Image: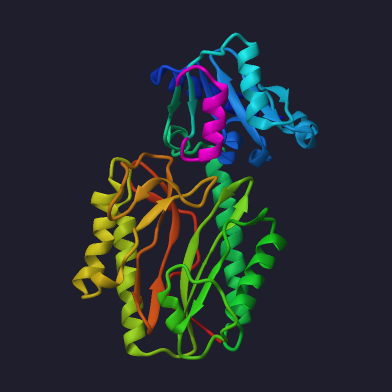
């Protein structure tokens, strides 16, 4: 592990301990796989947890991953387990903390797991909510570089797909090509299952690609992203398959203007709901399509494709420099068509930097 990586993990561990002080905790039980990776660098988080104390830092996992911990993790003592939570809590008890105050991630632990923790630990338990997720919201330079690389790979893959053409192909076939192109160009894999939806199916914001052939004269929404170094990119472009109608072009132009308005509102100190979402939503509502834009304008991107900050019509967060987020307004007319345009951006003091650079002119493909 490089010196820079080791320092980054040390700094993150210090931040987690500062969180513990604020919440008056003796230990922190970290079970969300993304938070396990963020704090320790361990990629087998589904079968691991961390226990962070004021002095100790333990990574708990079973024999399948002990060698991997040695390769990936620095600054954590390996606690070899067979029964993950049971053995992890026993490790706390052996350190004289059987009655300690432990914080846990209630949004991740199942009800059954929480009952196990409650049964085995006599001390106070406190749900820390989204506290660790909030720690991840502002990215450092290395994290942003991973997202930048993921975005560049996605841009290239989309260009190949557009050059191949869409007419006559099934949505599922296009989705498979995207996944193949992303991996060919160095991605760890897709950031999420790609959305490919043509014609009336494009009105389904999260349509699952099916066997429906894509037809000439329709709009096709493609929403995809790559994962690089654990970090995601996210982009949506809407393509015209051959010549489309004036109405289809008009809807596209409205969404584009809404997206540009949303991007213009992004800057450090702006609010995801009150500034960014309002700016994009106003354009669509003024054009008479307010009821056809049902989701939020954007979301944070990082280790997860949906994380903080929030840029929604109901929930939003104050933006800070170094946050990575999307701006993705859309219009969805049931039984007819759908249009969405999305970019991943980095928040700066004066605005934002686009990481997804694929053209937003309505691309006509064969």
- Residue 197 x/y as whole percent: 50, 76
- Residue 198 x/y as whole percent: 49, 81
User: Can residue 109 be seen at all in this image of the molecule?
Assistant: no
- Residue that extends furthest to the top in the rendered view of this protein: 96
Residue at 45% across / 33% down in the picture?
Answer: 135
User: Can residue 110 be seen at all in this image of the molecule?
Assistant: yes
Colouring style:
rainbow
Which quadrant: the C terminus? bottom right
When asked about the image quadrant of residue 47, the answer is top right
Q: Is residue 292 above or below residue 131?
A: below
Residue at 61% across / 84% down in the picture?
Answer: 169
When asked about the image quadrant of residue 334, the answer is bottom left
Q: Which residues are magenta?
A: 106-124
Residue at 50% across / 91% down in the picture?
Answer: 216
Residue at 24% across / 70% down in the picture?
Answer: 290
- Horizontal relation, residue 210 to residue 135: left or right: right
User: Is 39 covered by the magenta stretch?
Assistant: no
Which of the two residues, 101 or 165, is positioned nearer the viewer here?
101
- Residue 215 x/y as whole percent: 52, 89
Q: Is residue 88 above or below residue 156?
A: above
- Residue 323 x/y as whole percent: 42, 42
Which of the two residues, 43 or 115, is positioned nearer the viewer here?
115
- Horizontal relation, residue 248 to residue 146: left or right: left
- Horizontal relation, residue 97 to residue 330: left or right: right
User: Is 122 covered by the magenta stretch?
Assistant: yes
């Amino acid at each position: 592990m490089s010196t820079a990586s080791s320092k980054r993990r040390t700094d993150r561990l210090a931040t987690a301990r500062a969180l513990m002080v604020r919440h008056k905790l003796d230990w922190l039980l970290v079970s969300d796989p993304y938070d396990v990776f963020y704090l320790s660098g361990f990629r087998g988080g589904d079968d691991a947890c961390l226990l962070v104390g004021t002095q100790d830092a333990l990574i708990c996992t079973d024999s399948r991953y002990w060698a991997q911990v040695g390769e990936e993790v620095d600054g954590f003592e390996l606690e070899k387990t067979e029964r993950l939570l049971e053995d992890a809590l026993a490790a706390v008890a052996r350190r004289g903390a059987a009655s300690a105050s432990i914080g846990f991630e209630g949004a991740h632990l199942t009800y059954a797991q929480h009952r196990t923790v409650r049964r085995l630990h006599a001390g106070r338990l406190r749900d820390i909510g989204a506290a660790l997720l909030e720690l991840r919201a502002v990215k450092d330079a290395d994290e942003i570089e991973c997202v930048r690389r993921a975005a560049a790979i996605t841009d290239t893959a989309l260009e190949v797909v557009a050059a191949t053409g869409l007419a006559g192909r099934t949505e599922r076939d296009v989705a498979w090509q995207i996944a193949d192109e992303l991996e060919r160009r160095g991605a760890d894999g897709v950031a999420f299952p790609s959305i490919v939806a043509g014609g009336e199916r494009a009105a389904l914001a999260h349509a699952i690609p099916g066997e429906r052939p894509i037809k000439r004269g329709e709009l096709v929404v493609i929403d995809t992203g790559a994962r690089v170094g654990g970090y995601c990119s996210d982009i949506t472009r809407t393509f015209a398959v051959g010549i489309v109608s004036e109405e289809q072009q008009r809807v596209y132009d409205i969404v584009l203007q809404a997206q540009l308005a949303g991007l213009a509102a992004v800057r450090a100190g702006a609010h995801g709901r009150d500034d960014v979402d309002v700016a994009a939503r106003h354009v669509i509502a003024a054009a008479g399509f307010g009821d056809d834009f049902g989701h939020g304008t954007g979301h944070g991107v990082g280790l997860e494709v949906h994380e903080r900050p929030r840029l929604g019509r109901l929930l939003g967060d104050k933006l800070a420099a170094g946050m990575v987020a999307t701006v993705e307004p859309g219009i969805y007319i049931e039984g007819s068509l759908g249009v969405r345009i999305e970019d991943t951006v980095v928040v700066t003091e004066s605005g934002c930097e686009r990481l997804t650079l694929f053209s937003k002119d309505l691309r006509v493909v064969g």
